[in-house]
Image (cartoon, helix red, strand yellow):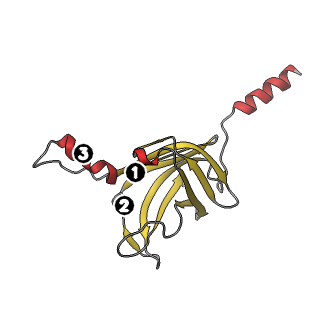
Amino acid sequence: MRRLAIALLVVGLAPQVARADTITGRWRLLAAEDLRADGTVARLPWGPRPAGAIVVQGGACYVQIMNTDTPAFAGEGSANEQMKAMLLSSYIAYSGPCVVDEAAGTVTLKVEGAWRPDYVGTEQVRFFRFADGKMFFGPAKDSIKTDAGPLTRRLTLERAR
């Protein structure tokens, strides 16, 4: 009986291997695009080579994305002031408890910490789907409003190893 209890304890503590078709786990960002209604790319919100990850584990979710193109800060103003001005457009991070509905392909995250104070306390709903070994993730279709019309953000991710 004692061996069985120890075996069950060890199995319970063993790392869980996420299924290929579940959002649970760590995902590495491959691309971030804002798409027009016709599916063409309108813009790359974090540049052509963004870096980032999404982690969904144990009822918590963490999102972090940044532009990897590091600008040279020169000219008027200190480099520190110039970096602060760029922060909102070159980096995003938020985290908090989340509820995943695998059947509906949604994650609802209650933001507890974020790079922008106005995100804290909000609920962010994101949609996801799987295709060709990748996950596609983002807010509701046409949720980004621009002068040229609505855009849909699409993050392309692969399971991190």
Q: Is residue 106 above or below residue 15?
A: below
What percent of the width, then of the height, locates residue 102? 68, 56
What percent of the width, then of the height, locates residue 148? 36, 76
Depth check, mark 1 against mark 3: the one in front is 3
Kindly identify the residue that appears in the image at 64 percent across and 60 percent down: 105
What percent of the width, then of the height, locates residue 137? 53, 59
Sooner in the amino-acid sequence: mark 2 or mark 1: 2
Amino acid type for the residue under numbered disc 3: Met
Sooner in the amino-acid sequence: mark 1 or mark 3: 1
Amino acid type for the residue under numbered disc 1: Ala
Give the structural element (helix, strand or loop) at label 1: strand
Rounded to the nearest whole Å, what is the CA distance between mark 1 and mark 3? Answer: 18 Å
Rounded to the nearest whole Å, what is the CA distance between mark 3 and mark 2? Answer: 17 Å
Q: Is residue 105 above or below residue 70?
A: below
Kindly identify the residue that appears in the image at 33 percent across and 51 percent down: 88
Quadrant of the image for the N terminus? top right
Give the structural element (helix, strand or loop) at label 3: helix
Circle 2/circle 1 CB separation < 8 Å: no
Rounded to the nearest whole Å, what is the CA distance between mark 2 and mark 1? Answer: 12 Å
Residue occupying the far top of the picture: 2
Q: Which residue has dot 1 on it?
A: 51
Residue nearest the viewer, comparing 35 with 134: 35
Q: Which residue has dot 2 on it?
A: 45
Depth check, mark 2 against mark 1: the one in front is 2
Find residue 83 and name its label. 3
